[in-house]
Amino acid sequence: MSSGKMRQDEVRKIIRAEDEWEPVGPTPMPSLTELRNWDMRLLDTYEPFYAPFCDLCCLCTFGKCDLTEGRKGACGIDIAAQQARWILICSLMGTAAHGAHGRHIIDHLIEKHGEDFKIDLGTQVNVEAPIIRTVMGLKPETLADLRKAIEYVEREMIHLVAATHMGQEGSSRDFESKAFHAGMLDHVALEAADIAQIVGYGYPTSIADTPLVDLGWGAMDQEKPCIVVVGHNAITSNAIIDYLRKNDLYDKVEVGGLCCTAHDVTRYSSNAKVIGPLSRQRFFLKAGLADVIVTDEQCVLTDIPIMARESNSALFACSDKICYGLENASEKNVDDILKAVLEEQKQYLILNPEKAAEVIVRTALALAPQRKALKKILNTEEATELAAKCGGTCEACNRACSNLLPVNAAIHQAGQGDFTKLSALFLRCIGCAKCEEACVKNIPILRVMQAAASRETYKMRSGRGPIHDVEIRKVGSPIVLGTIPGVILFAGCSNFPGDIDDVAWLAEELARRKYIVTLSGCAAMAAAMKKDAEGKTIYEKFIPEFDAGCIVNVGSCVANAHVVGAAIKIANIFATLPNRANFELMSDYILNRVGACGVVWGPYSQKALAIGTGAVRWGVPIVLGPHGSKYRRLFISNKEQSDWTVMDGRTKTLVNTEEPTPEHMMVTVETKERALVTIIKQCFRRNDTPPGRAIKLNSYISAYKQVIGTLPDDLQNFVRTEKEIPIVYKREVLAYLKEVGWKPKPVLSLPTIIGTYDTKVPIEATVK
Amino acid sequence: MSSGKMRQDEVRKIIRAEDEWEPVGPTPMPSLTELRNWDMRLLDTYEPFYAPFCDLCCLCTFGKCDLTEGRKGACGIDIAAQQARWILICSLMGTAAHGAHGRHIIDHLIEKHGEDFKIDLGTQVNVEAPIIRTVMGLKPETLADLRKAIEYVEREMIHLVAATHMGQEGSSRDFESKAFHAGMLDHVALEAADIAQIVGYGYPTSIADTPLVDLGWGAMDQEKPCIVVVGHNAITSNAIIDYLRKNDLYDKVEVGGLCCTAHDVTRYSSNAKVIGPLSRQRFFLKAGLADVIVTDEQCVLTDIPIMARESNSALFACSDKICYGLENASEKNVDDILKAVLEEQKQYLILNPEKAAEVIVRTALALAPQRKALKKILNTEEATELAAKCGGTCEACNRACSNLLPVNAAIHQAGQGDFTKLSALFLRCIGCAKCEEACVKNIPILRVMQAAASRETYKMRSGRGPIHDVEIRKVGSPIVLGTIPGVILFAGCSNFPGDIDDVAWLAEELARRKYIVTLSGCAAMAAAMKKDAEGKTIYEKFIPEFDAGCIVNVGSCVANAHVVGAAIKIANIFATLPNRANFELMSDYILNRVGACGVVWGPYSQKALAIGTGAVRWGVPIVLGPHGSKYRRLFISNKEQSDWTVMDGRTKTLVNTEEPTPEHMMVTVETKERALVTIIKQCFRRNDTPPGRAIKLNSYISAYKQVIGTLPDDLQNFVRTEKEIPIVYKREVLAYLKEVGWKPKPVLSLPTIIGTYDTKVPIEATVK
Amino acid sequence: MASEVMTTPYYKVNILTGTKAAKVVAEPAEGAKIIDKANNPLYVFGPEVIDSQVGDKLLIEYALEIAKSRDIPICATTHVKKKMMEFGVMPDSTYDTIEIIHFLKNKEWSGVRGKGFHDLVLFTGVRCDYAERGLSTLKHFAPHLKTYAICRRSHPNADYALPVIPKVDKWRDYLEGLIAALNTA
Amino acid sequence: MASEVMTTPYYKVNILTGTKAAKVVAEPAEGAKIIDKANNPLYVFGPEVIDSQVGDKLLIEYALEIAKSRDIPICATTHVKKKMMEFGVMPDSTYDTIEIIHFLKNKEWSGVRGKGFHDLVLFTGVRCDYAERGLSTLKHFAPHLKTYAICRRSHPNADYALPVIPKVDKWRDYLEGLIAALNTA
Ligand code: SF4
Ligand code: SF4
Ligand code: SF4
Ligand code: SF4
Ligand code: SF4
Ligand code: SF4
Ligand code: SF4
Ligand code: SF4
């Protein structure tokens, strides 16, 4: 884009360059190509790994074009660039979903509070927006400033979308650089959106021990009128809470959420319930417990209008993203709407949240009595009868299952009155209903599951938002030295390869080993679905602080921003490096010195792809569950065979560290066991001090022994000096190292890749 | 989106609501859902027709999902909604390409001239921006105002992209409404971009007889250093012209363009040459005549870096959309760049147009002497020898051909020294090189074509930009009455099903019949590639005015805006209906009263899809060549079996017109013959007066007899009263009508669909 | 189940990406049976019937014989009608390709002869990539009918397709075989 | 050319959308020949080898016999090594699935035993949808090697795949047949 004087002045005006807080760094509001050299440097070490999902391209009418065996499309594109183009397209869907969400919330709150409404995240959070500060160079002070962040995203996005048109970008590496840009913009949008809703709705902030809220489909009180909000955008849900409060109906009506709206509505009101993640959406809606279903946006099953009819639930769509072809009643009078809903079961689109709230609550109150009979959960007898038709042999269900589950055996067994296998299956089910659709005997499999699904109510700590500056000051040093072995974020969706509570297992294994564990989105919900002997969930067992061995739920998908933000704060607050318009400096610090790792164990959405791709640009490695392979692209190094030369910031000399840390920037693993050791390994950093590395190696060895049974096969790659060998394993490790011919490696006190590529950032900037 | 008070004030501020020119209409800067009712009304009559390109969906990691036989995806989407989602995704690629292009040009020109630089399109054009006026309600006066238009597009786009994410929109009709929105935004971007470059570069405006420029690969003087600019964005090309002028090199260097950049550079300098449309890109570049290849953006073959190496041409990429993984030399010193280019054949990315221009010209001057030997065109002997290996039987080439051409026969014949078939083939070849790639004998088929391709130089009138207000005043009445039978726009790409000059045939057939014929983009180039007995192209034969029987080249793809703009101007200037923020009023007028039809005979690009989809929302029917079926969606009525009831604006009563006009809003046809009668039919309007309809029927009957041999089989649908029967065919037609039991139909003096659906536009508004 | 025969069409642009592929009708006799099973078939002629030579006949001559054998109504798309009349035959419909396919999607439609919906639609002479799109429309949106693409380039999106027949004489044999089978059956 | 056999995998999510499909190796004997042709094969074990029962044996027991028959180096992914050691076998590599595939793409790579690139890669026990993605990577980016997916769910993106074998006893027969063929050949 034009980087001329006019534009520079415009940018300085937008970010109030004259503001004193920090001098403006080299890259305020970077455009498409400004961070390209950084991207290329990452790609040199972490090569894109492509797994094409299709041999062809069909994006323009010259196609279909066959791209196998080195063939090019009519436009000249090859299979690698085509995969990278897909990655960009999908990342943009994710960035747009969050950006549009942010724009909607911010505009709505500006209508409510005015654009000068101040951003105040409480006494514990002074660096309010580390991502926006770093990327844009703006210190947002009002809602209007957050709007600037979204406007920046909107402006950059159009160029990225343009690049996906036929006859545009031709290089896979440049497509990846553009995808990184999309991912970084996604993080800007996330941060702006969550800050806006925190200040605009007064969500908890600057407190760690947020309330424990009820989670699970059993948590919903069937006796009450039941409103179920589905999606990601809590504007309407919060209006419903307001209406209930205003009209003293709060204890008379149940409000439960599916997907991230559940997080945000419980941040607004801890009386609201979390029904579950995306994987429980169809199961719950088919159970017919909802008197009124309210859809907003994102991760909302597109056939909800049909499910609502089947279960005689009322449906209101409340987002311009999802209109379902329904009549827009936003300007219709409330009583007319109610009449049509109650008498003709009409479904409406209502884009005015206050009106929607009134209609929704009044509908629930009127409908609930009529629907009592429909709100019965299938008992085992009924379920057995429904399943009895299954011969167990045709396996049409299995073949259709998106999670490759043995449905036939479970249903066949259920048909004989035994629900053991079905209960186990339910834990792995992601709720796609393809089995049911495929069933040759038309068995309503998801309804049969009601008899097998636990009605347990679980406790989840509601989302807490930003990490506190004091927490950062406390953990900054141990994290950078390595004595806190790492910061883990479990983010994203519920497309899990195995049991829904595997996330809880991983979180606990890591918290036990003194990692700082954070969670968000559907992962944060799933992690609540496991109780220990005393019936406690991890949220009840572990302290909710950002500290070693603690577990924090940051909130919905948009709250992911706060964990990246925490990494930035470590560089900025603890290491006191300037972050203003200083993307490369911050990312280089994180990549080399902050042992953070993002985990998306059940990835499905384009949003999760955008978040993960953005994280990589920030220098945070990502570990994905096996479904993540269907995103088509990973970032893999050649491990010990790559060149791991970096700069020593103090001596300003190139040093071959000989250690692959972090080893990969985006990798999939197949089992939770391998995930555990991989996550631990991804937290190694070049900056680890020998004592720090010793602690990390201790975790690595103990976990490896636990799940794989021996010392790590690549231990030699990560032991730099004998001092780093954990005492407990000393003898064993020394023997092993001797056997494999290990030699000591250099330990740098200030590792950086600044200076190893063409950048405006002077190497001096890395030294403080 | 938020349509609250704050937003309304913001909008009024952006469009300067206080400006006097017209009162602000009902829909200033409409958001996602504001024109939804209009869209649904169109879809009621013109149903989406889907031709799935794939049985599956693979957009998220729950997939692949099988959508055959009524199956739904894991997200619940069905095959129709999935096709509509694709349409939205692809339309957005098109809208983004134009929007980003507009943003780039406008920002660049603001750097050059300042944001207060006035918009002046000359004495003949007072309504400077009918689309922006109608959609936004803004009368743009400066470059800064045009930037507002792009900002509006950016802001809306993010919501549309968001809607394509998994778990968002679930209704195919709402996806289409969103695609219409994308298309309308595309037109806003087109108009802003072309106006900006006209005023910023002083392209011809307010004159009709723009210069005739040379077209064809034979037009390039091989003796001179040869610079070839490829793409759509003339910023760098124009800088090259400036540099040549400033350094008196203009007559010493050839500058030729491929695709729309060729249009725009010839609007800037009529000495520049148009080499040809996209379908000639690969053929020409493989011929190696270019000493320097310059790529900007859009419709640029992605393997140009490889082709440049093969032909030892220098390559400079000059857009952030297309970086090819090249080193960014924007801040490198010119001599260093030249050195690396000339000594190491290095290819560079240069984003600074002035620097790029100097480097490019100096490279051309230095390289040309060394490349003399390489600039030889294959003679028939050499070509015969290369083709001789072909046995003509394996047909691997045919099977790979994206245009289904009989390559084997042509190459086999060429192998025997006879190039008849290959010359014929070349006219149908769209230049994908798949035959060459597939050839089992590795015959360089595109090079062999050199010996078969005519070296003819053709004359094309350079793009003229906006239609003049006086022209509108002159033709407004006859168009609306129907006595000028129609306004035709041949737009879009060169993915032609048949001969490249079929567009010339169609244009001439229509001009002969007194239609107003306009052309743009690759179609405008292709139309020049046919000479009559006296060696004249249609641009030399027909008067270049916007009047009956004339032919106008409006310019590049972005200039398409001016034809839609002309339709709006008819309603606004001639009929004096207010257009400010009055989208539905203008579109309703066009749909019912302006006999306009858009034709994309060689569609390939997502941009062409966006343009066409936008045109439909404006009420302009689109006719596509057969490749258009691969866009996946059309808009088709049930013809005589649909309900064609509309309002009579004067009596305010519903009248069943019983006539399917316009019959379809987006339809593909297979042959140019059928295209001719279909285009003519799409120009019928309900508003035609009997004399007007008689003239249109006269064209229809004569054309139908010419190509199909009888009276039109659906003649009865379009004859409303006996008065409308053309005299020449009177007896024959009367006999036919009697035979089919024709009955007279009502003729409305003020047909409108306002009032047939829920809209803020009062029916009174349609009356003037 | 182990593995299924999936027709690979002559033209690569027509490669199927999906799960529901045509049954290949290699034997003209099978083709005749399919036509005989239909209650209300329709035959759609595309422009190639009047452009392409099959041996010493035009493709349309064979197509007309097939139609005649069972009095199958003909929809003459594009400008086929003109040439068709030279053979003394008037089409039952001149809807263009997209139009006839649009009507065929609708089970309530009266059909070209008012006898109700067509349960079998034959296609010949439609440009191969174009035909494939239309066949896809019917495959997905017209469960009440079957399509039979009588085309030597083969069509995966049809319900019944020919194998790829590269040689013209074999193509002629198929057409003559089909006509013979229809006239003897 | 007329029509080609294209394997349809057990799992629908693994349906091929493309042009290059596996050759179905229905006969264990053919499989043995493929292995014998290889100069430097590699065997990748996925976690299902230690989870899935084939008759009264674990899948890994069969996989180990196949490897033993030709001394094929083994890459034990995920946490397979632990169980493998119980059978007294040490893997040659413990790279995880993506890592080994990433190295295999590189023709210059030394291979797990330093003997240069592997020209045949066998896969057993990798989660079916995950294996299919990795096979796609090798199909597109490793022209120097062939893949043979020894999996009863069938893998279109492999070069050689089994037919779908729904019944466990038939699956056992295939494995035993393959081992027998290898040990007699
Ligand atoms: S974008 Fe390129 S590869 Fe894709 S269909 Fe079009 S020409 Fe073929
Ligand atoms: S609903 Fe559950 S069991 Fe059924 S197919 Fe989907 S994932 Fe498998
Ligand atoms: S498809 Fe239905 S009947 Fe067949 S095994 Fe599955 S559940 Fe049983
Ligand atoms: S975590 Fe993923 S699935 Fe869950 S709500 Fe967020 S995006 Fe949707
Ligand atoms: S978007 Fe829907 S249909 Fe497409 S792959 Fe995902 S779940 Fe399946
Ligand atoms: S280059 Fe021309 S002839 Fe060759 S395959 Fe493409 S369109 Fe056909
Ligand atoms: S592929 Fe090559 S050899 Fe075969 S027919 Fe075509 S041109 Fe001739
Ligand atoms: S007309 Fe089409 S092909 Fe030609 S330049 Fe424009 S978009 Fe590209």
Image (tube, coloured by chain):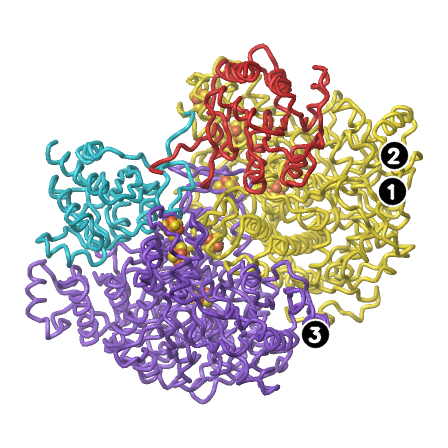
Chain colours: A yellow, B purple, C cyan, D red
- Circle 2 residue: A695
Q: Residues within 10 Å of mark 2 (few under 14, many from 20)?
A: many
Residue at (76, 69) in percent of width and height: A16
Tell which subunit mark 2 falls on: A
Is the CB atom of the residue marked by disc 1 within 8 angstroms of ligand 4's nearest atom?
Answer: no
Q: Quadrant of the N terminus of chain A?
A: bottom right
Tell which subunit mark 3 falls on: B
Closer mark to the observer between disc 1 and disc 3? 3
What is the number of the mark on residue A688? 1
Image quadrant in which you'd find residue B61: top right
- Circle 3 residue: B334
State the image coordinates of residue B757 (x, y, percent, origin top left). 36, 60
The amino acid type found where label 3 is placed reads Val
Say whether mark 3 and mark 1 are on the same chain.
no
The amino acid type found where label 2 is placed reads Ile
What is the number of the mark on residue A251? none
